[in-house]
Image (cartoon, coloured by chain):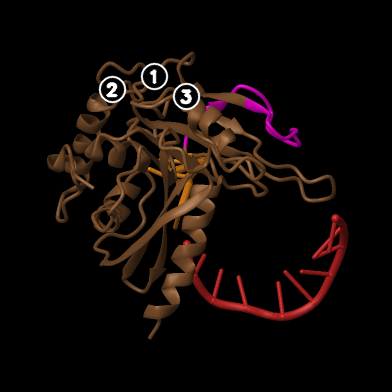
Chain colours: A brown, B orange, C red
Amino acid sequence: MRQAYPEFAPKSGLSRAEMESLQRRVAESAVFEDALPFDPANVSLGDPENETLTGDSDTPLVAGIDQSFLDDRALSAVVVLRGGEVVERVHAVTDLDLPYIPGLLSFREGGPILDALSELDTDPDLLVFDGSGRIHFRQAGLATHLGVICDVPSIGVAKSLLCGTPDEDLDGRPEGWRTPIRADDSVDAVGGHPATPETTIGYAFQSRQYDSRPIVNPLYVSPGHRVSAETAVDLISQLSGEYKLPEPTRLADAYADEAKAQYED
DNA sequence: GCGACAG
DNA sequence: ATCTTGTCGC
């Protein structure tokens, strides 16, 4: 798929200050409101009973993206779904040049992800990433950074919270429950995006809860680009099936591990 | 100096 | 993220 803003693509050799200033520029270009070229109500995993909605061209193409690692290389995997049906899977193996640094994840994994996305024949309407979007120190997490580069609606789905403060206690909540994540002192105001204690930068979302023992932790859903925090959670809810992770990301995660076997020395 | 941190 | 056995439940 095409890059609308290649100048924002993560380059190697940047200093920490340069990476942070690029993130601020990305955040300034990011849209944290609904600016979707499709109807969010049409996003679904489809109904096994009625197959009519699944193959419909009104049903948006949703891509799940995740990585697995082999020494100093990343394997980035993309799975594209239309109403629950897998229509394409691609992956790319790319050398890594940075270690994992909290707050700079997109500079480690962004290159590999763009390599994988360039292999796509289909052109996704929505990108779902494993990581944060607006829930980020400079409001420019992985999902925001890549969503802006591609100028495609994107959402970040993280398994743990990078920053921000939940409105309520998160323990033992029922399926479907959600509560806002508000900006805190670690979040900077950037461009037209405020970061006051009232600013909602994402939601904690209880996607799954089993009747028995282990209490499942919630997911942390945040806008990447061209989507509001509210619509982002709604979309992730609509894309959730029998597991904790939404289908696009869960399938990309599984595919990243599956494909990895072919490259292990 | 202390605390805190996606994958 | 990754390294890993057993274990509980449907």
Magenta residues? A163-178
Q: Nearer the viewer, residue A121 or C9?
A: A121
Cα–Cα span, label 1 and label 3: 14 Å
Vertical placement of residue A35 versus A86, above or below: above
Pointers 1 and 2 in contact (C-beta within 8 Å):
yes
Please tell me whether the stretch drawn in magenta is mainly helix, strand or loop. loop
Q: Quadrant of residue A92?
A: bottom left
Please tell me which of labels 1 and 2 falls first in the chain: 2
Residue mark closest to the camera, 1 vs 3: 3
Residue A77 part of the magenta-drawn span: no
**Given the image, on which type of amino acid does mark 3 rest?**
Ala
Q: Which mark is residue A229?
A: 3
In the rendered view, does A87 fall on the left or right side of A148? right
In the rendered view, does A70 fall on the left or right side of A108? right
Cα–Cα span, label 1 and label 2: 8 Å
Q: Chain of mark 3?
A: A
Vertical placement of residue A140 versus A252, above or below: above
Label 1 and label 2 in one chain: yes
- Mark 2 residue element: loop
In the rendered view, does A151 fall on the left or right side of A210? left
Q: Position of residue A240 (x, y in %)?
A: 60, 41
Please tell me which of labels 1 and 3 falls first in the chain: 1
Q: Which mark is residue A190?
A: 2
Q: Nearer the viewer, residue A62 or C9?
A: A62
**Given the image, on which type of amino acid does mark 2 rest?**
Val
Q: Which residue is mark 1?
A: A195
**Given the image, on which type of amino acid does mark 1 rest?**
Ala
Residue mark closest to the camera, 2 vs 3: 3
